[in-house]
Amino acid sequence: MRIQNSILILLCIITLINSACYRKVEAVSYEDRVEQIRIDNEKIRNFYKETTSKEERQRVDRELPPYLFERFIDLFDYWYGTPWDFNGITQTPRKGKIACGYFVTTILRDLGFDVERSKLAQQAAEKIIKTLVSETYIKRFSGMSTGKFIRLVEEMGQGIYIVGLDTHVGFLVVHTKGVDFVHAARTGGKRVRSENPLTANVLKKSKYRVVGKILDNKELLQKWLKNEPFVVK
């Protein structure tokens, strides 16, 4: 009976991971979406904690990255168009303004990463990355063209990356069709947007670039599963 129940629970988890219903942004408020994500996260965490099956845990380990990838995309959709401001700290999309660091840490927090939202947002971009990502999954680049930089990031594989620049931080989304730069932009309308990284001025002008890959990072995902804090050092 325990095996049958366990399989049923695992199937429910996989259904959550593969669900497309999250994409209907206009039908659900941001607050309700974040609450639903919190509930789904708890189901995954509880299942992972309670199961004694190595195979079941390995299945969750495999399915967790695509689950979180889709949730990142879900929340990005809500934030597009939110005004940027250097001192912006809003926690609600399109209500108030938000700075680049606060955009990054708010997304992470609302996806279930236990981060110190305000403290982390005020750190240098590389420190934000190092707070979450182990050195194995961090790459640093300097003195190269934007095109070469993007090609090298693509070679690191599909997923979500935090990208730190000289004076800016955002996300790079590597997917089957290329790369998107998602950030609270200081230029081009001063708003949260997704743009082609090859033409993004703030990325082109930065002399130093550092990226941290989130979803292939086993240590990071284990901390997420155990709901452990990511402490600013």
Image (tube, rainbow, N blue to C red):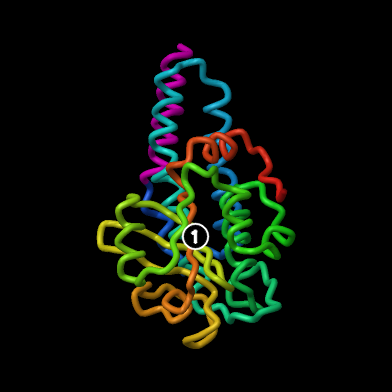
| Residue 106 image point, x, y percent | 62, 61
- What amino acid is at disc 1? Val
Q: Horizontal and vertical percent for residue 180?
A: 37, 67
Q: List the residue tagged with mark 1.
A: 210
Say whether residue 232 is left or right of residue 147.
right
Residue 16 lies in the magenta-colored region: yes
Where residue 110 appears, as percent x and y from the top left, is: 60, 55
Magenta residues? 1-18
Q: Is 62 located above or below residue 196 in the figure?
A: above
Q: Nearer the viewer, residue 117 or 35?
A: 117
Q: Is residue 13 magenta?
A: yes
Residue at left offset 62%, top offset 60%: 105
Could you classify mark 1 by the number of other residues whose Cα lies within 10 Å: few (under 14), some (14-19), or many (20 or more)? Answer: some
117 on left or right of 195 = right
Task: Tell me what residue is drawn at x 43 percent, y 42 percent.
Answer: 216
Q: Return the residue found at the far bottom.
A: 189
Magenta highlight: main SS? helix
Compare residues 135 and 65 and report the one nearer the observer: 135
Quarter occupied by residue 177:
bottom left
